[in-house]
Every structure is written in structure tokens, then in C-alpha cells.
């Protein structure tokens, strides 16, 4: 080969290194299932005595023989997703299986509920009413920057606390970023308005079905239990978060050099008038927005134990107007509501059917996460190691005050929220352990639910494993490291406030 041929030969490029991608919640739970199944061979079986309500009696833990052969354990692993969906717990043995007689142990009710609300939310977004409503609000407040920030964050937070509004915010960057830049703010203000607005609502979920709903079901309490504490917490933490973003926005507007994100070419070339006016809300859009508000208002009314909330007595006799609805009724409510919204929007039979099916398909992932997580608890139940794990944690919190216990629940869930980014999966996996632990500490299980969801919500404000955060900063063209610099003081403030609220809730209840 001549020198010319050698020079002409293309240079071989070194193979590009594959970028690490954090596995999905389904993959994580599959690994967790295998790990728990393997650990069940090493962790001794044990049990607590149960009271008439089925709650473990503190101090009665004792070792037992699970009586399971290797084939039995292998069968539990094989059937764990099936048992997680519709496994039935035998009344005598306590074992869970798809062909036993007793009470439903699987998460079929919650599974259908998630599918139903997914169909409803998808139909609502398909009408364009919610997107246009938020766009009109942003444009109307365009000349009042602080009020615009507060208004958008309040709406996002309200949607977050009642229906888990999070991933849906990714569609609003194209509207909010140019509007904030036109008002003299930077891209970080838009990022904080969107991520923190919705995120603080999810953190302080009141009746969010994907957080409070799933956790309450796993803890065997009503969706409305603890709603007063969560509502007060939502008001305070939302106000603090809005004030934090407005304070930064005011500083940047007065002195652009203090911007943490900086400005890209063209960011400061437009005025508020250049942002463009969204189309007006039609009468149909207004009707749909009213209908959506009525559906969620009725949902809250139907699940709240009003007699307990008003009197403060958990054992109070329910008022005559209380519905006491749970997941079966709520699933039916949202399925019917999806059809009603589609009919009002004049979708037609084919479009409405296709949209409902699409909504169910879009939400099959969180629904399956719940099933897999429940399957893990079935493995622990059948091998009788759940009470052993509970007993080991009991030793850590025994003798602590109720306030310290509540803070402990919040802190211990922080690393779990990082490892299991799915809110639903995290709740289904953790609650069977944490809820009985609350009984030992003399703390309401509703406080445990609140502490757990606060931990999950706090982590999701910043961890890079969530699409809402990492996707949001990418859409806003803000560096993730710069976002962390912006948000960490608020995270510290929220951490202290959350600990105070859960401690107060534990003492109060």
C-alpha cells in the first residue's frame, strides 16, 4: 500500500461511550421483585398477633415456620404480577393466591382507577380547554409580572394537589418561557414557575389519586383521612414557593446580571406585546372547564369523612350526607365523566372511543407499576417476612415520640423516592410496612401517608430521574446544574417546613 493510499484511508473513530440511562420504574421493580424473593430465603419468617381490626399488636412478634417449599416460593415469584392484580388472601392461612377464597389483596381496584382517571384527563386535554384556559390567564396577566407568576403557579399547584398534574406541564414551556422573557425575566423564572408550581402541589397532594389515593389504599385508610392537615400544608408551602420564585424574579428584573441561568441571544429582544395573544375561550371551553371543576369538587366531597374532619374525632358517626366513596366508585365516576366531557365537546363516537382508549394506554405504565409493587408485597406476605421487617424497624423507633416518628418516616422515604421514581410504585411498596408501624407509634396512618408523599414530592422537585425536572430544564434551555443552584435554598426551607408539619400532625392527631 502506497503512502497516498494510507493518507486516503478514513480514520477509525473510537466507539462512542454509551450514556447511562436510569432504568424505568418497571425495570427497577422487576429487580426489586427478584431481590426480595432471594432475600426471603435469608430473612426468618415471623408474625405478630393481630387485633380485631387486623392490626399487629406491639410486643407480640414471634418466629414462625412459613411452610413453603422451594417450588412454592418459585410459584410465588412466577405469579407475583398476577397476585399483584387480583390475588385473594385466604382468611385462615393468610396466604395470597389467584384461586383462593377470602378478601381481595391485589390492586385491581386501584389499577382500574388509574386507567379511568387517565382516560378522563386525556379526554379533557383533547378538548384544548385546559391548555387554552392557562394560556388566556398568562396573557391577561402579562403586564403584571409578579401576579402572572403567582397566578400560573397557583393554577399548576391546584391541579397538582388534586390530580397529580406534573408531566402535563412539559407542554407549557413554549408559552411560558417567551412570556417571561418578554416581561424582563430570565429562563430560570419560567422554569421555576412551571416545575415548582406543579411540583409543590404534588408534594402537598390532598386527593391526588396517584399519590394520596394509592398510598391511602395501601395503608387501608380512606382517601379523605388527613385531608385537613394536607390542605393547610398545601396553602403554606405553595405560598412559600410562590414567594421564593417571585423574589428571584424581582431581583433578576432589577439586575439582569444576577441571573443564574443567563440570557441566550435574542432573549432580551422582545416585549410583552410580542408574545402573542392566545385564542379566546369559547363557550364550549368554558363549559368543559366548569365541568372539570365540578368533577374534582364532587370527588373531594365524596371521599372526605366530614364528621371526623369537622369534629376531630376519628370514630365520629358519619353524617347522613357522607358518601364514603372509595376506588370502585371513583373509577366509575371518572369513566362516566370522560364520556360526559367527550359528549359535551361533540367528539362523536369514534373520536371519543379512540381518545378514551388512548388515555387508558397512556396510563397503563403507572397502573402496571402498582401491580408489580403489590406483587412484591405478596411475596413478602406468603413467605411471612413482612412482620420480621416491621419488627426490625420497630426497634429503631421504639421509645421515640410521635413527632420524631413522623419525621423519621419522611426522612427514611427520601432515598426510596430516588430509587423508585414512580410515586405509585413507591407508595404500594412502602405502605404495607410503614402503616402498621404507625399503629405501634400511636400515630395516625394518615400522617404516615402525608409524610411519605412529602418525601416523594420533595425529591421529585430536583432528582434527575424524573422527566418533569430533567425534561423541563432541557425545554427551557437551562443547565441542570444551574437549576440546582437556584432551587437548593428552597429545598432546605421546604425540608424544615415539612418536618414541622408532619411532627405537628402526629401530635395533633
Image (tube, rainbow, N blue to C red):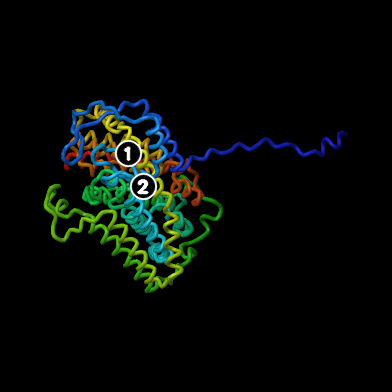
Q: Is residue 402 visible?
A: no
- Mark 2 and mark 1: span between their CA atoms? 17 Å
Q: Give the labeled residue for mark 1.
A: 430
Residue 233 x/y as whole percent: 26, 48
Q: Is residue 225 visible?
A: yes
Q: Are marks 2 and 1 in contact (CB under 8 Å)?
A: no
Residue 29 lies left or right of residue 336; in this view the side is right
Residue at the image point whose x is 40% and y is 45% from the top: 369
Residue 123 x/y as whole percent: 40, 63
- Quadrant of the rendered structure where residue 288 is? bottom left
Q: Nearer the viewer, residue 352 or 471?
A: 352
Crowd around label 2: few <14 · some 14–19 · many ≥20 (10 Å): many
- Quarter placement of the N terminus: top right
Judge whether 147 appears above or below 449 on screen: below
- Quadrant of the rendered structure where residue 466 is? top left
Residue at the image point whose x is 28% and y is 50% from the top: 234
Crowd around label 1: few <14 · some 14–19 · many ≥20 (10 Å): some
Residue 268 x/y as whole percent: 51, 56
Q: Give the labeled residue for mark 2.
A: 85
Q: Nearer the viewer, residue 507 or 333?
A: 333
- Quarter placement of the C terminus: top left
Whichever of callouts 2 and 1 sits on the residue coming sooner in the sequence is: 2
- For label 2, the SS is helix
Residue 441 x/y as whole percent: 20, 34
* Numbered disc in front, either 2 or 1: 2
Q: Nearer the viewer, residue 273 or 152?
A: 152
Judge whether 509 appears above or below 309 on screen: above
Amino acid at each position: 500500500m502506497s503512502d497516498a493510499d494510507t493518507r486516503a484511508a478514513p480514520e477509525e473513530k473510537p466507539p462512542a461511550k454509551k450514556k447511562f440511562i436510569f432504568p424505568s420504574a418497571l425495570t427497577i421493580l422487576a429487580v426489586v421483585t427478584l431481590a426480595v424473593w432471594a432475600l426471603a430465603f435469608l430473612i426468618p419468617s415471623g408474625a405478630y398477633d393481630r387485633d380485631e381490626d387486623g392490626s399487629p399488636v406491639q410486643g407480640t412478634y414471634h418466629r414462625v415456620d412459613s411452610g413453603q417449599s422451594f417450588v412454592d416460593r418459585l410459584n410465588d415469584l412466577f405469579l407475583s404480577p398476577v397476585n399483584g392484580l387480583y390475588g385473594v388472601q385466604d382468611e385462615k392461612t393468610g396466604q395470597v393466591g389467584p384461586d383462593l377464597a377470602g378478601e381481595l389483596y391485589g390492586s385491581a381496584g386501584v389499577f382500574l382507577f388509574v386507567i379511568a382517571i387517565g382516560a378522563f384527563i386525556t379526554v379533557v386535554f383533547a378538548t384544548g380547554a385546559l391548555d387554552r384556559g392557562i394560556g388566556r390567564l398568562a396573557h391577561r396577566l402579562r403586564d403584571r409580572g409578579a401576579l402572572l407568576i403567582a397566578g400560573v403557579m397557583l393554577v399548576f399547584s391546584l391541579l397538582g394537589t388534586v390530580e397529580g398534574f406534573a408531566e402535563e406541564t412539559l407542554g407549557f414551556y413554549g408559552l411560558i418561557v417567551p412570556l417571561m422573557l418578554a416581561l424582563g425575566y430570565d429562563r430560570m423564572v419560567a422554569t421555576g414557575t412551571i416545575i415548582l408550581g406543579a411540583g409543590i402541589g404534588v408534594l402537598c397532594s390532598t386527593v391526588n389519586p396517584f399519590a394520596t389515593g394509592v398510598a391511602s389504599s395501601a395503608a387501608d385508610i380512606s382517601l379523605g383521612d388527613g385531608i385537613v392537615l394536607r390542605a393547610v400544608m398545601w396553602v403554606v408551602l405553595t405560598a412559600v414557593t410562590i414567594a421564593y420564585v417571585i423574589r428571584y424574579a424581582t431581583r433578576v428584573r432589577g439586575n439582569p446580571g444576577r441571573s443564574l441561568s443567563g440570557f441566550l441571544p435574542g432573549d432580551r429582544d422582545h416585549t410583552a406585546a410580542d408574545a402573542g395573544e392566545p385564542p379566546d375561550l369559547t363557550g364550549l371551553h368554558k363549559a368543559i372547564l366548569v365541568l372539570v371543576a365540578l368533577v374534582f369538587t364532587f370527588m373531594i366531597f365524596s371521599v372526605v369523612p366530614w364528621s371526623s374532619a369537622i369534629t376531630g374525632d376519628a370514630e365520629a358517626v358519619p353524617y347522613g350526607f357522607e358518601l364514603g366513596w372509595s376506588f370502585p366508585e371513583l373509577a366509575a365516576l371518572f369513566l362516566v365523566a370522560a364520556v360526559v366531557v367527550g359528549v359535551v365537546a361533540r367528539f362523536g363516537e369514534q373520536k371519543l372511543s379512540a381518545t378514551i382508549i388512548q388515555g387508558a394506554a397512556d396510563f397503563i405504565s403507572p397502573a402496571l407499576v402498582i401491580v408489580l409493587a403489590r406483587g412484591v408485597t405478596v411475596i413478602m406476605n406468603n413467605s411471612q417476612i413482612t412482620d420480621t421487617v416491621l419488627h426490625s424497624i420497630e426497634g429503631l423507633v421504639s421509645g421515640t415520640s410521635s413527632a420524631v416518628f413522623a419525621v423519621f418516616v419522611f426522612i427514611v422515604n427520601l432515598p426510596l423516592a430516588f430509587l423508585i421514581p414512580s410515586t405509585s410504585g413507591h407508595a404500594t411498596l412502602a405502605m404495607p410496612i410503614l402503616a402498621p408501624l404507625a399503629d405501634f407509634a400511636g400515630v395516625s396512618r394518615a400522617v404516615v401517608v402525608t409524610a411519605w408523599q412529602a418525601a416523594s414530592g420533595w425529591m421529585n422537585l430536583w432528582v434527575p430521574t424524573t422527566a418533569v425536572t430533567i425534561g423541563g430544564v432541557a425545554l427551557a434551555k437551562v443547565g441542570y446544574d444551574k437549576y440546582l443552584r437556584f432551587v437548593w435554598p428552597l429545598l432546605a426551607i421546604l425540608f424544615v417546613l415539612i418536618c414541622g408539619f408532619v411532627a405537628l400532625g402526629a401530635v395533633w392527631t
